[in-house]
Structure formats: structure tokens, C-alpha cells
Image: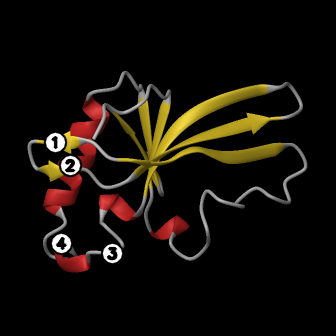
Amino acid sequence: MSDPPVARLAHIGGSGTWAFPYPDGALARHPYLAVDVVEPHIQVATPYGPSPAFRLCRLTDRRVGRSTDFLYVWMHGLDPDNRSEAPGNSVRASERVFDVLERRPESFTKEDGEVVRL
């Protein structure tokens, strides 16, 4: 388990990204935006147990050649292979997610449907 990589943004997935492969292929048909997974599995030790798997992703605007890295975590930080923490026990998953995000200098976190200032 390592420290999380530096990324300007973080996206906490939720119901908005539940039903399709995200970020893989999410912008495949977009004329100028692309998203790629740079590191597919980043896990960090936290005081609340191991973090969920984060992905380091890169959003690229081909019109201007600019890229922005962001961290992505699936479904509020719940482990898709271990649903025992959901739905009534998801507090532990949230503690793990925000412990990881507090270690990085991100200014904003994008959660499906809302923007949260850290």
C-alpha cells in the first residue's frame, strides 16, 4: 500500500456511474475529450483499514493538448467484491476514502451529483 499519487481532482463514484464502464470507454465516442486509466489499482493503508481501490485517471482535451489527472473510486468507496459494508455500514468505507483524499492537495472532489470542497 502506497501513498496516493498527486492529482488535482478526485471523483467519488455513485449511482451516476453505476450502470456503465467508467472511466474505461466513457468518452470513447467524444470528438475531442478522452479519459484513460493511468494506474488501475491504488490502495492505501488508513487507520480504518485498507482503502478501496482508487484509479489514477487522465482526462485529455485533444483540442488544446491539455490533460488533468484525477483519482476515481467506485460507488462511494464500497468494495465491489465485498458488499458486507453496504448499505447500512458504509460509514467505514467513507472514512477510508476521505482519509486518503485528505493526504493530497486536491482542491475539489467530484461526487456523482455534487461538488464537495475539501
**Which of the two discs, 1 and 4, sits closer to the camera?**
1
The three-letter amino acid code for the residue at tag 3 is Asp
Give the alpha-carbon distance from disc 2 to disc 4, as whole Å: 12 Å
Say if mark 3 contacts mark 4, CB within 8 Å. no
Circle nearer the N terminus (1, 3): 1
Please report whichever mark, 1 or 2, sits nearer to the chain's N-terminal start.
1
Q: Which residue is mark 2?
A: 96
- Left or right: where does residue 7 sit relative to residue 35? left
Vertical position of residue 85 compared to residue 4: above or below: below
Mark sitting earlier along the chain (1/4): 1
Camera-nearest residue between 39 and 104: 39
Disc 1 + disc 2, Cβ < 8 Å:
yes
- Ranked by sequence position, the earlier of labels 2 and 4 is 4
Q: Secondary structure at mark 1?
A: strand
Residue named by callout 4:
85
Q: Could you say which disc has been placed on residue 46 in the image? A: 1
Label 4: element kind: helix
For marks 3 and 2, the one nearer the N-term is 3
Q: Residue at x 41, y 26 (%)?
A: 106
Question: Number of callouts in the render?
Answer: 4
Q: Residues within 10 Å of mark 2 (few under 14, many from 20)?
A: many
| Amino acid beneath label 1 | Thr
Q: Quadrant of residue 90?
A: bottom left
User: CA–CA distance between discs 1 and 3?
Assistant: 19 Å
Q: SS of the residue at dot 2?
A: helix
- The reply, left or right, for residue 35 in relation to residue 15 is right
**Residues under labels 3 and 2: Cα distance?**
16 Å
